[in-house]
């Protein structure tokens, strides 16, 4: 049953060397045309393609018109107020950024539970008071100009806020450890 593939290809080459009779290609094309005639097919599908193209073109035109109209209206930009310490010197700006970043970092690390919510809210109220004082110091810096007292008071305010976050974190850890005595014994 198994045949040598070389013998098969030898036979194939002999067949392919034979020439086709004259007019074979023309007869083949005639038969092909009889079986599969080339009729231009105009259908509903062509009409739908044109209609869909028109809808897309109208939609894009409408969108472009809206975009042009909204760009012509000038909306007021959000005003970002630079901190007064940053206006005074880059070093003071770095100090302020350092404290604010650490305050936000410590605040994000704090885990509040229903048991510690009251304590957390109390610290947040105190933090809000310090924020208001800082805003007043910033206003004073812009109105009356920089003085050593206002600059030092601003930096001290930032230090107080950061220390407040550290104390809150410590208190929450103490409460957590006091409420889990079994975990302390097992550790």
Image (cartoon, rainbow, N blue to C red):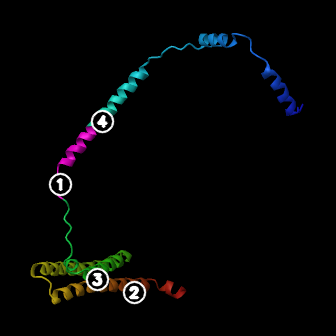
Question: Circle 4 sits on which residue?
Answer: 59
| Marks 2, 3: nearer the viewer | 3
| Residue drawn at the location 67% of the way across and 14% of the way down | 25
User: Of the numbered discs in the image, which one, if any, rests on residue 174?
Assistant: 2
The quadrant where residue 29 appears: top right
Secondary element under disc 1, as helix, strand or loop, is loop
Q: Earlier in the sequence, mark 4 or mark 2?
A: 4
Q: Nearer the viewer, residue 171 or 143?
A: 143
Where does residue 151 sit, x and y in percent of width and height? 19, 86
Q: Residues within 10 Å of mark 3 (few under 14, many from 20)?
A: some
Secondary element under disc 3, as helix, strand or loop, is helix
Q: Earlier in the sequence, mark 2 or mark 3?
A: 3
- Residue 25 within the magenta-colored segment of the rendering: no
Question: Viewed as shown, does residue 90 lie left or right of 1?
Answer: left
Report the span colored magenta: 62-76
Question: Circle 3 sits on which residue?
Answer: 95
Q: Is residue 150 above or below residue 50?
A: below
Question: Viewed as shown, does residue 72 lie left or right of 119?
Answer: left
Q: Earlier in the sequence, mark 1 or mark 4?
A: 4
Q: Nearer the viewer, residue 37 or 171?
A: 37
Question: Viewed as shown, does residue 72 lie left or right of 23?
Answer: left
For the residues labelled 1 and 3, the Cα–Cα distance comes to: 34 Å
Secondary element under disc 2, as helix, strand or loop, is helix
Q: Earlier in the sequence, mark 3 or mark 4?
A: 4
Q: Earlier in the sequence, mark 1 or mark 2?
A: 1
Q: Residue furthest left?
A: 144
| Marks 4, 2: nearer the viewer | 4
Where does residue 92 sit, x and y in percent of width and height? 25, 82
Q: Is residue 113 visible?
A: no
The quadrant where residue 36 appears: top right
């Amino acid at each position: 049953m198994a045949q040598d593939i070389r013998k098969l290809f030898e036979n194939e080459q002999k067949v392919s060397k034979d020439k086709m009779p004259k007019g074979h290609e023309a007869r083949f094309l005639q038969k092909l045309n009889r079986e599969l005639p080339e009729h231009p097919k105009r259908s509903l599908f062509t009409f739908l393609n044109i209609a869909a193209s028109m809808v897309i073109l109208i939609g894009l035109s409408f969108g472009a018109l809206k975009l042009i109209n909204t760009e012509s209206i000038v909306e007021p930009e959000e005003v970002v107020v630079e901190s007064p310490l940053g206006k005074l010197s880059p070093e003071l700006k770095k100090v302020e950024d350092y404290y604010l970043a650490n305050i936000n970092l410590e605040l994000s690390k704090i885990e509040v539970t229903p048991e510690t919510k009251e304590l957390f809210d109390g610290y947040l109220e105190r933090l809000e008071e310090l924020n208001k004082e800082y805003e007043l110091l910033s206003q004073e810096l812009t109105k009356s100009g920089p003085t050593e007292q206002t600059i030092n008071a601003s930096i001290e305010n930032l230090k107080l806020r950061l220390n407040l976050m550290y104390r809150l974190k410590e208190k929450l850890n103490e409460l957590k450890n006091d409420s889990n005595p079994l975990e302390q014994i097992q550790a």
